[in-house]
């Protein structure tokens, strides 16, 4: 009986300590902190990508729905807490058969350390609503954090938790340059399919590597040169560069029909801003699937013709990136022959960074 009593007493103490530890987490609504990666602040809710006025004006309802996904958005904050927690609710609790839940609807925490953004840990979703300690047992020192939001779901609420004895505040130093953002328009690959976690989409990788704001306008299956999206992009007269990565979502005819007008919409308000055209990646299975190989060649050739036409018309600020080195030549950079793994995203980010630096030097 004494042994059982002692065991019971120890168990009660342990549970009490656990409850006290949980109680020491204090949550703050993330709306109090800067949010980067948005094309405009004029949105229905804070955590989405398209302006409210487009709700009934998009070419296809899917564009508006995908605009609710938070790909490319990140919250910046500062804290001296020994632990960082998050509590968030997603819009749709999306499931897919070729992408991890962490990438679809999880969070990704990074910390500024040794003059770079260092991965801390992911917050893994448990359903529509999740509360989770992301990292604990840290030393109590002030740090700058970046929290990336889900790639393929929306966020209806988000709070960040820290120790009750710690502070959480606006960033002390804004390491990410938001003066001249780089705006990227494109497809599911642009949106982040199928990164294992939010930080591994190529625009989020480049945000960290280049310490510069990237705005993600990737719309899965719907990067189809819709003119209303060009109008939204054109409003960002402060953009340092526009990147167009739409080829996988359009056929040869649509490239010929819509590319020039799409660019002209942007050019009306941004006559000198550099525009970079990206060819389609070379799908690994196109080595074997001859129809796929022919389609890629034809579409990339059509894009190059449009690019050359713009140059001949006098546009001196258009640039071109071929698709033959965008992903790993060994074919190991995709999940399904089309959408990228983290390895593929790192490769495309490296190639893109070299090109961007050459344009903006």
Image (cartoon, grey):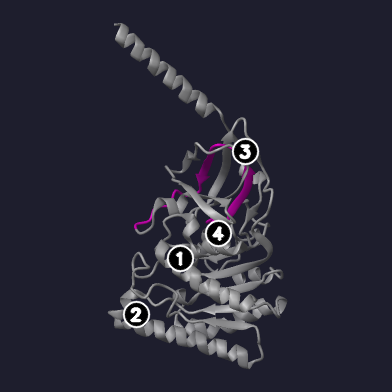
At x 42%, y 80%, the residue is 324
Q: Of discs 2 and 3, which sits in the foreground?
A: 3
Q: Mark 3: few, some, or many residues within 10 Å (few <14, many ≥20)?
A: some
Disc 3 target residue: 28
Disc 4 target residue: 72
What is the spatial separation of the Cα atoms under label 3 and label 1, in whole angstroms? 33 Å
Query: Decide: marks 3, 1 in contact (CB < 8 A)?
Result: no
Residue occupying the far top of the picture: 1
Where does the C terminus fall, quadrant-wise? bottom right
| Nearest to N terminus: mark 3 or mark 4 | 3
Seen in the picture, residue 276 relative to 126 is either above or below; the reply is below
Along the horizontal axis of the image, is 260 left or right of 10?
Answer: right
Disc 1 target residue: 346
Q: Position of residue 300 (x, y in %)?
A: 46, 84
Q: Position of residue 181 (x, y in %)?
A: 65, 66
> Magenta residues, as a range?
68-97
Disc 2 target residue: 292
What is the spatial separation of the Cα atoms under label 3 and label 4, in whole angstroms? 22 Å
Q: Of discs 4 and 2, which sits in the foreground?
A: 4
Q: Position of residue 4 (x, y in %)?
A: 31, 11
What is the spatial separation of the Cα atoms under label 1 and label 4, in whole angstroms? 15 Å
| Nearest to N terminus: mark 4 or mark 2 | 4
Query: Decide: marks 1, 2 in contact (CB < 8 A)?
Result: no
At x 50%, y 56%, the residue is 199
Q: Position of residue 359 (x, y in %)?
A: 61, 78
Is 335 within the magenta?
no
Q: Of discs 3 and 1, which sits in the foreground?
A: 1
Seen in the picture, residue 33 relative to 219 is either above or below; the reply is above
| Nearest to N terminus: mark 3 or mark 1 | 3
What is the spatial separation of the Cα atoms under label 4 and label 2, in whole angstroms? 30 Å
Q: Secondary structure at mark 2?
A: helix
């Amino acid at each position: 009986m004494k042994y059982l009593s002692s065991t019971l007493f120890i168990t009660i103490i342990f549970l009490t300590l656990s409850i006290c530890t949980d109680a020491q987490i204090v949550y703050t609504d993330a709306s109090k902190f800067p949010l980067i990666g948005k094309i405009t602040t004029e949105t229905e809710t804070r955590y989405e990508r398209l302006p409210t006025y487009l709700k009934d004006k998009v070419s296809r309802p899917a564009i508006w729905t995908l605009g609710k996904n938070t790909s490319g958005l990140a919250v910046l904050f500062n804290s001296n807490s020994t632990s960082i927690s998050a509590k968030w609710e997603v819009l749709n609790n999306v499931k897919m058969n070729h992408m991890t839940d962490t990438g679809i609807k999880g969070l990704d925490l990074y910390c500024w350390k040794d003059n770079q953004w260092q991965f801390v840990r992911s917050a893994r979703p448990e359903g529509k609503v999740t509360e989770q300690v992301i990292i604990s047992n840290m030393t109590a020192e002030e740090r700058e954090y970046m929290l990336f939001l889900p790639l393929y779901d929306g966020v209806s609420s988000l709070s960040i938790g820290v120790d009750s004895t710690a502070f959480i505040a606006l960033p002390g130093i804004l390491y990410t340059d938001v003066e001249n953002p780089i705006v990227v328009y494109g497809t599911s690959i642009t949106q982040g399919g199928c990164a294992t976690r939010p930080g591994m989409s190529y625009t989020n990788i480049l945000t960290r590597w280049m310490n510069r704001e990237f705005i993600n306008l990737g719309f899965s299956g719907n990067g189809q040169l819709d003119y209303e999206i060009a109008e939204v992009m054109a409003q960002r007269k402060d953009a340092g560069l526009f990147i167009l990565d739409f080829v996988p979502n359009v056929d040869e005819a649509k490239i010929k029909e819509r590319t020039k007008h799409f660019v002209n919409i942007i050019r009306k308000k941004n006559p000198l801003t550099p525009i970079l055209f990206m060819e389609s990646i070379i799908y690994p299975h196109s080595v074997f699937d001859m129809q796929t190989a022919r389609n890629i060649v034809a579409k990339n050739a059509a894009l190059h013709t449009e690019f050359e036409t713009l140059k001949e018309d006098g546009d001196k600020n258009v640039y071109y990136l071929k698709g033959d080195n965008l992903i790993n030549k060994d074919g190991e950079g995709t999940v399904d022959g089309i959408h990228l793994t983290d390895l593929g995203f790192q490769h495309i980010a490296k190639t893109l960074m070299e090109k961007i630096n050459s344009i903006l030097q």
